Image (cartoon, coloured by chain):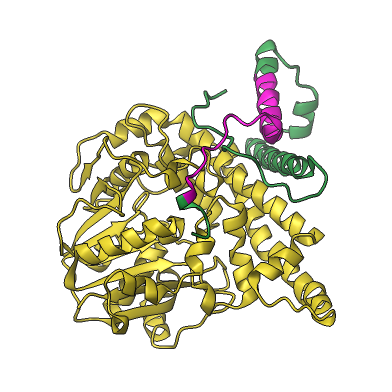
Amino acid sequence: MTTRRIPRKRRGQRHQFFDADGVDEVLSCVLRLTSEVSALSERLYLTERALEDQGMNVASAIESYQLSEADESVLSAERQRLIETVLAQLGASSEGAESIEDDLSVGS
Amino acid sequence: MNRSHDHEMAVTLTQGDRSRRAFVATLRSHVLQRMAGELRQHFEGTVGPEHAKSGAPLETPEAIHEAMKVEFPFKAYSSVRTAAQEMVFDVVSDAVDRELEMLNEKAAQPAKTGTLRLDPSLQLPKSVTGIDVHLSPGSYHVEHAEADVSAGAVYDNSIDVFAFGQFGKQHNDIGSTLSNYLRLKFPDFTPASILDCGCTIGHNTLPWAETYPDAEITAIDVAAPVLRYAHARAESMGVAAHFKQMDATSMAFGDEQFDVVFSSMFMHELPLKHLHQYLKEAFRVLKPGGILWQMELPPMNAMPNYENFCMNWDTYYNNEPYYGTFRRQDYQQLLIDAGFSADQFVEATMPRYTFIGEEAFGEAIEDGNTFDTLTGRMDPKGTRWYGFGAWKR
């Protein structure tokens, strides 16, 4: 995994739009998951096209493939990344926003 | 491999990066077109008529907001829009993280045409440091490495996703549109010195050099990471521009230095007190005969109520707390308060220059101004940018 130096979670509380707690966050999770499903679908599409270009029987090759320890390591790291991405909004906020002085507030 | 942009500060994109960016751009477009359209239908077909029937018609954007925020379509629209906004920065940060050392090294190379002057002693305003503007983690000023450009790189990459192509190929349409408006509308005006205030990565600074090739181009911002990136980006594109770290509310320039003071999407990020200070400074640094000419969100008093309700979403939910206050101002009066004369006020709504070309643009700016669903909004059907300013006589 790439070392993450750029923060992925903004400061401050998220707005709650739905009345029940957690619905907005779950919707965010679903959208992030959908993004990952989309990326995966596109990857599979590209894989099939690339293999077909080389004259390979894709379905048969995939079903008969035996995973190595190195494969398991790669897939495990990818699973972890996927979970962190999908659940990104469920973690505690890293830090609170500083308060803005009254004289800068809206409506002044 | 795919590259994010056609300049040297571009990052390499994996197929995964490309897919995730395409997904979020599509999601953003879906929210702002399809879901926003359904929200409007719900208002026009149900919420608006029901309130009118009950004797309490919704006659202000605030009243529309109060009535709509309890409705399921608004909750769904807002929740998805917020999630999509957060995802914009998330999906572009991986590629920047991977190549950050290389980007920082490139940005540190000696300049060939322009200059970069940072001021480490500059005190950043709390309106910048206190919140993550646009829900962008770390906003535009936080640094994650020595001589860091990551905030600039994230911003450049985020525009691709955020604006789903509506800012032009090099994100430069606003600068192109406003500079070409001046060139075509006032052909005798040939500025020798142009200042862009709150320039971030200089994407709307550089088109001024194309429109007025003989002018000296200067651009300021308070945030060092975006300025380093802006400078490196301009150098790699072969455009001479001078980037300086400076607060537009207290500029270090002498009086009467510039023929044009420009800004884009800048004033609505300023607290009202700072907005007044900035405009007074703009008046001070302008030469007599020069013009203050700025792209902004259209004023609330010119737009229909429902459009104002839509535009106010950002001030309530997108960490842009001064946006609503700004749009409620009388723009002409703001300039009068800063020293400009009322009869020198200029305003225009303009189609996008880089999208429609010189001929159609030249014809369109002869028409009167229009304030409707396409004014100041990102819409593939034909956005019109709003500009206002004044000549200093």
Residue at 44%, 41% in the rendered image: B129
Q: Position of residue B226 (x, y in %)?
A: 36, 43
Residue B318's place in the image compared with B339, above or below, is: above
B168 drawn magenta: no
A99 drawn magenta: yes
Judge from the rendering whether residue B192 lies leftward or rightward of residue B221; answer left or right: left
Q: Quadrant of residue B351?
A: bottom left
Residue B24's place in the image compared with A25, above or below, is: below
Colour assignment, chain A: green
Q: Magenta residues?
A: A74-102
In front: A107, or B268? A107
Q: Position of residue B45 (x, y in %)?
A: 80, 76
Q: In which quarter of the image is residue B30?
A: bottom right
Residue at 78%, 33% in the rendered image: A59
Colour assignment, chain B: yellow
Q: For the view shown, which residue lies furthest in the bottom direction?
A: B367
Q: Quadrant of residue B393?
A: bottom left
Judge from the rendering whether residue B164 lies leftward or rightward of residue B124; answer left or right: right
Q: Number of marks in the image?
A: 0
